[in-house]
Structures are given as structure tokens and as C-alpha cells.
Amino acid sequence: QDKLAASGGGLVQPGGSLRLSCTSTLTISKISAIHWYRQTPGKEREMVAEITDTGSTSYQDSVKGRFTISRDDTGQIFYLQMTDLKLEDTAEYYCHANLDFGIEYWGQGTQVTVSA
């Protein structure tokens, strides 16, 4: 059973918005950080945003001011709100969890395509 399930990808025009969701079945107290990564064919997976167990957030420079990572009150759903999307944001997006003792999990990807 997948520990992380990503959803919300789709086709959007430049300047548009999408919200990705990552639903976790992991034990909340064991999660130290959740990340959103993205990857395009032929390129390495890159981190886009992070939220830690304390709620601290950080972003890749290219998405600062446009993307927002957050979590719901249950601590089991994590969001990536993406606004002012650009062609270069097209990628497969993945959620990733860091747990205690170096354990990590990846969710399946969700495709985001920005196209006119």
C-alpha cells in the first residue's frame, strides 16, 4: 500500500493555477519533513518545496512567490498551491517524506502540463 498518494495534476494555461495534494498514511509524529519534487525527462529530480514538522517552509528560487506548500489540520494531507504557472513548470511532481532514522518514502507522480 502506498504511503503517499499524490493527485491534482493536469493541463493548465500559462498564468493559471493548480493545487496538488499528497495524502499520507504515515504516522504523523514520525514525519520530519514533506517535500514536493518535480522531474522532466532527461533531467534530475529537483526539490520544489519543503514543509517541516514545525511548519517551517522553504522553496526553490524559481517558484518563490508563486508556489505555497501547506498541510491540513490532520497533518495527513499536504498541498502544493501553484499559481502563475509557467511553461517551465511542466513536469511530473512527486511528494516525498522524510521520517525518523533516515527513512524516506516517495509517492507516485502527478503530471503537470503548462501549455497554451
Image: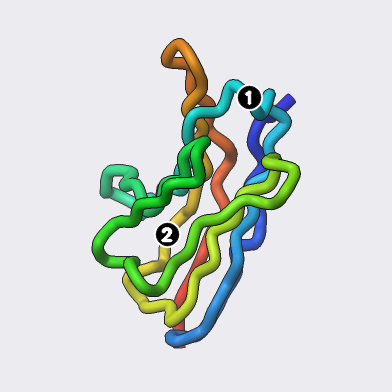
Eye-nearest disc, 2 or 1: 1
**Drawn side of residue 38 relative to residue 19, left or right:** left
Q: Specify few, some or many for label 1: CA neighbours under 10 Å numbering under 14, 14-19, or 20 or more.
A: few
Which residue corresponds to the image point at 58% horizontal and 37% vertical from the top-left?
A: 107
Which residue corresponds to the image point at 45% horizontal and 88% vertical from the top-left?
A: 116
Farthest front residue?
54
**Amino acid type, mark 2:** Ala
**Amino acid type, mark 1:** Ser
What x and y, as percent, mark residue 114?
Answer: 46, 76
What x and y, as percent, mark residue 23?
Answer: 69, 43
In the depicted structure, whether residue 7 falls above or below residue 76 = below
Mark number for residue 91? Answer: 2
Q: How is the image coloured?
A: rainbow
Mark nearer the N terminus (2 vs 1): 1
Which residue corresponds to the image point at 64% horizontal and 36% vertical from the top-left?
A: 4
| Count of all numbered marks drawn on residues in the image | 2
Quick one: 116 or 19, which is closer to the camera?
19
Q: How far apart are marks 2 and 1 (CA)?
A: 30 Å
Q: Is mark 1 on a helix, strand or loop?
A: helix
Query: Which residue in the structure is indicated by mark 1?
Result: 29
Image quadrant where residue 87 sits = bottom left
What x and y, as percent, mark residue 31?
Answer: 56, 28
Which residue corresponds to the image point at 50% horizontal and 45% vertical from the top-left?
A: 55
Farthest top residue?
101
In the depicted structure, whether residue 8 falls above or below residue 34 = below
Q: In which quarter of the image is the N terminus?
A: top right
What x and y, as percent, mark residue 20?
Answer: 60, 60
Q: Is mark 2 on a helix, strand or loop?
A: strand
